[in-house]
């Protein structure tokens, strides 16, 4: 559940960035078809980018088979100090669980609202008088009804049918020909998942506005008098349609629509600015891969809705991951098997390599991530030895195995060097230096 919430939050961040980019660079251009495509692309990209994890594309199972000098382990410390980081703050779990509950309650409410609107729309279409044409079906209804189109249907009141038939039908036919309803349907489905995000609603409004601009442009291109058409828009501007998934004749800001009708066509070279989307998408992927973002995402991913109804005082204690044998065996294993790479010794490279070792629910080493690199040879040697560790006993919460992350520090130093360890649990690997090889 937490994985899904983390994914939705990343997607929400993308939509905010994309909306701001669109308003800044594209909203005033007359490339209506291109703008429609870009907005739809933004929606799809916002849900695709968070699913890309660049860190998983890296090969962490690198093995170095280089023999080297000796190993000195100056002291052993209990694993408790390192494994404290897997302790779970139950209050945080409750907060994350509340976020999940609020999100899904909102999702349920918005879904029910949409279902009601859909049922009203279908009922309206069924009870109206149908006149079938080749490319659309005209539905004439009694009483007050703002003209709108949905899929192949054009819904219009008897009064509008008699008074403004040509202009309104031309406008709504343009919506049908460009398949605007299908685009809104896609956006509405995605919008359900982003109901809490104002940028998502604003981006949908931008798409609806572009639909109207494009339909208006088609009407004027068909030869209908611009002044009479604009007067009709003013006449129909009062009120709004309650069918948000449909293309309403009077949708969008009247002033903006008339402005777009009178505006000169955008310079074709202005399309070059749309290329900005590609580096922005790449930047989003890089941002999601940042360690700080990954840690927050991981915290959400490990949260559980069930924690909300459990009293933290009644929870079973968290059991930390354990290396086979006693707590010192992990350090003994590393000390016995790690080597000081000969190429690093020849180059005179020393330093402290820090890493995070992820232990899976089955106890296997799932991932080794270098958090403080020193040199490619030293880093690869740390990755190699960590991946060769035998299976651990996985950490547990409430008796259920969970992933955990344990930090390790490995100090590579030459005999007589002044390099000091930074933690009592550091593993110290002693080499002889380039002069002694």
Image (cartoon, helix red, strand yellow):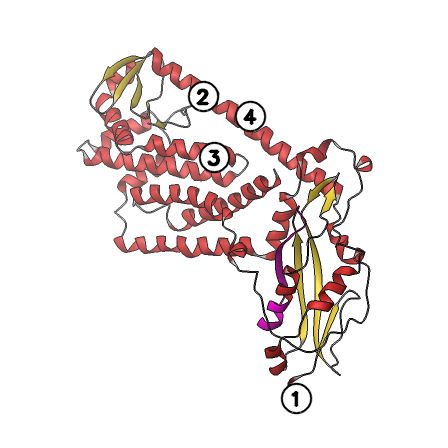
Q: Secondary structure at mark 3?
A: helix
Choose top left, top right, bottom left or bottom right for residue 31: top left
Q: Mark 2 touching mark 3, by CB under 8 A? A: no
- Residue 256 to residue 235: above or below: below
What distance separates the C-alpha of mark 2 from that of mark 4?
13 Å
* Disc on the earlier residue, 1 or 3: 3
Q: Which mark is residue 109?
A: 4
Q: Which mark is residue 117?
A: 2
Q: Nearer the viewer, mark 1 or mark 3?
A: 1
Q: Is residue 375 visible?
A: no
Q: Secondary structure at mark 2?
A: helix
Q: For the C terminus, which image quadrant?
A: bottom right
Q: Which residues are magenta?
A: 362-381
Task: Give the residue at x 43% y 42%.
Answer: 43
* Disc on the earlier residue, 1 or 2: 2
What distance separates the C-alpha of mark 1 from that of mark 2?
81 Å
- Residue 171 to residue 35: above or below: above
Q: Nearer the viewer, mark 4 or mark 1?
A: 1
Residue labelled with disc 1? 435
């Amino acid at each position: 559940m937490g994985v899904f919430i983390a994914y939705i939050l990343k997607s929400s961040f993308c939509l905010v960035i994309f909306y701001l980019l669109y308003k800044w660079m594209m909203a005033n251009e007359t490339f209506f078809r291109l703008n429609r495509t870009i907005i739809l692309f933004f929606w799809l990209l916002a849900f695709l980018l968070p699913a890309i994890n660049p860190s998983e594309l890296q090969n962490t199972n690198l093995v170095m088979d280089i023999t080297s000098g000796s190993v000195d382990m100056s002291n052993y410390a209990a694993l408790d100090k390192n494994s404290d980081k897997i302790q779970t703050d139950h209050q945080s779990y409750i907060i994350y669980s509340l976020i999940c509950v609020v999100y899904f309650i909102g999702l349920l409410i918005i879904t029910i609202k949409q279902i009601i609107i859909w049922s009203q729309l279908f009922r309206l279409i069924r009870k109206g008088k149908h006149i079938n044409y080749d490319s659309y079906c005209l539905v004439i209804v009694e009483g007050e009804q703002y003209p709108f189109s949905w899929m192949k249907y054009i819904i219009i009141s008897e009064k509008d049918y008699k008074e403004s038939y040509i202009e309104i039908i031309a406008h709504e036919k343009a919506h049908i020909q460009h398949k605007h309803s299908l685009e809104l349907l896609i956006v509405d489905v995605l919008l359900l998942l982003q109901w809490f995000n104002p940028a998502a609603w604003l981006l949908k409004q931008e798409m609806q506005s572009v639909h109207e601009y494009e339909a208006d442009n088609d009407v004027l291109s068909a030869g209908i008098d611009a002044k009479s058409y604009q007067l009709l828009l003013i006449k129909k501007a009062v009120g709004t349609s309650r069918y948000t998934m449909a293309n309403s004749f009077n949708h969008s800001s009247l002033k903006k629509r008339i402005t777009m009708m009178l505006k000169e066509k955008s310079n074709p070279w202005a399309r070059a600015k749309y290329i900005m989307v590609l580096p922005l998408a790449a930047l989003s992927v890089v941002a999601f891969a940042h360690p700080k973002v990954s840690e927050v995402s991981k915290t959400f991913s490990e949260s559980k809705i069930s924690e909300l109804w459990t009293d933290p005082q009644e929870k079973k204690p968290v059991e930390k991951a354990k290396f086979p044998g006693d707590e010192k065996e992990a350090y003994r294993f590393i000390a016995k098997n790690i080597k000081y790479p000969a190429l690093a010794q020849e180059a005179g490279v020393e330093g402290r390599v820090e890493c995070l070792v992820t232990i899976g629910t089955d106890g296997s080493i799932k991932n080794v991530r270098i958090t403080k690199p020193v040199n490619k040879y030293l880093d690869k040697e740390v990755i190699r030895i960590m991946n060769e560790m035998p299976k651990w006993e996985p950490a547990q919460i409430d008796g259920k195995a969970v992933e955990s992350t344990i930090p390790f520090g490995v100090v590579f130093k030459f005999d007589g060097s002044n390099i000091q360890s930074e933690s009592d649990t550091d593993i110290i690997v002693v080499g002889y230096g380039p002069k002694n090889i």
